[in-house]
Amino acid sequence: MTGLVQQSARQLTGAIRAGRLSAAELMAAAYDQIERLNPKVNAIVNLLPRDEALAAARAQDDARARGENGGLLSGLPLAVKDLEDARGFPTTFGFRPFAQAVAKADGEVTGRIRRAGAIIIGKTNVPEFGLGSNTFNTLFGATRNPYDLERTAGGSSGGAAAALATGMLAVADGSDMGGSLRNPAAFCNLVGFRPSIGRVPDQRAFGWLARLGTLGPMARNVDDAALLLSVQAGYCATDPLSRMQPGAAFGGALDCDPRTLRIALSADLGGLPVQSGVRDQINQAAAVFADLGAQVEENCPNLDGAMAVFQAQRAATLATLGKQLDRQVPDWRRHAKDTAVWNIEKGFDLTADELIDAEIERTQIYRRLARFFERYDALLCPAAQVAPFPVGDEWVREINGQPMATYIDWMTVCCAITVTSAPAISVPGGFTADGLPVGLQIVGAPGQDIQVLKVARLFEQATGHGKFRPPMLDPQPAPQAE
């Protein structure tokens, strides 16, 4: 059964549709894996009882026997990120006062996933309110990295990443504001795709200005990420920035001729501090593309001011969370972690001038990026400036001796890209000398999501980095950097 849960989502759904595998068999294998490994990594929370999950799987099998066609995700066990509503499960945000906040209905994207045949079995752990790229909270505790249990799985989609890397799930949903899909994917040797804003519907408060976050897919390979995206994406009338392109557009082949590609490389995204082990793997990734026949040159878009924009617009978004907390939990500051309180208060303190200036600056950054991509098909850079760090460290305080002023600054390599609204993916990029995963971030031109997936798949197929599973699953060690 261990081999079964390590198969790709496409393999599993294909076997179910062909009658070679039942949903009940897959569910039993998934629960065996969860019962064996979830206590070690703490990835899935509020898990559905095994007998209820098996009953749901058998109901699907019975429907299939009657001739009913399953959807694209038919029979796949799936746990929803604990920031999104799934009917019958608490949406806790990793916040103790929300422990019993059971959702009465699915969120828009969760509903799409369920209608596509996935069986919702629980939630994946997040940092409190989804803030920070280290998944821990006082309600459920910390999620640990399957490649080294003393290190973090990243965040905020850290529970999703640990569940995927250990074979408890075949695909997982997530969301990304400052790197919350890309960072945990990088730390756990996975694929995490941040689509263009509006590609996947978002029902949260900021539908127009200052919109930074988006939902998206995470998987063990690019094809599976595209499969989940094909379900998540598509027009939604209640999202003011929703794109008209149907999700089915992401269900096709992702073949790409490397000889047609013009690739820009920036191993430090214009001068950011980056650990040497990470930088080395990004430079090696560029060499892979050059060997494949792509035109590669060092260059970086002008992202001056991007981090100031991100800080302001993130704070504005969190002010809406603060207003909700004021209504629902008046003493919320007593329960929340210090960084959350600081960031929400920063939102309360924003002035109108600061918000207007951030919007103007963001527009200029976008235009500079669009001009940059007139010359290039993709930009290569790190998906995280550091390798996975100790799980007991709340956030990275310094890189290469350079202090980080806030709990967000060490994630600048992702946050700055967020401001551009461009699609970006983290794909397995190799390993440090200590055997820790490194993620390669591939950024595309605005709206060119399919192109980003194609370039990522090309690299994935050329290197095979993603095939190296955590030591707890595979006795074969990950290759170490030379």
Image: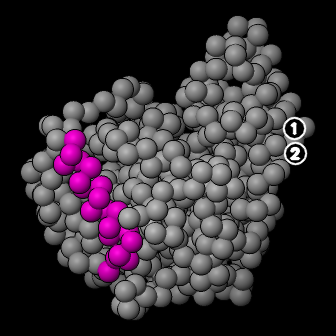
Label 1 sits on what residue type?
A: Glu
29 vs 442: above or below: above
Using the rendered image of the protein, determine whether residue 352 is visible from the camera's viewpoint.
Answer: no
Magenta residues: mostly which secondary structure?
Answer: helix
Q: Quadrant of residue 162?
A: bottom right
Left-right relation of 397 to 68: left
**In the depicted view, which residue is nearer to us: 218 or 364?**
218
Q: Split into 4 quadrants, where in the image is the N terminus?
A: top right
Using the rendered image of the protein, determine whether residue 28 is visible from the camera's viewpoint.
Answer: yes
Percent from the top left, x then y, of residue 311?
Answer: 38, 78
Crowd band around label 1 with a 10 angstrom C-alpha radius: few (<14), some (14–19), many (20+): few
411 vs 113: above or below: below
Q: Residue at x 59, y 78 (%)?
A: 390
Label 2 sits on what residue type?
A: Pro
SS at badge 2: loop
Q: Which residue is mark 2?
A: 49
Numbered range of the magenta stretch: 273-292
Q: Which residue is mark 1?
A: 52
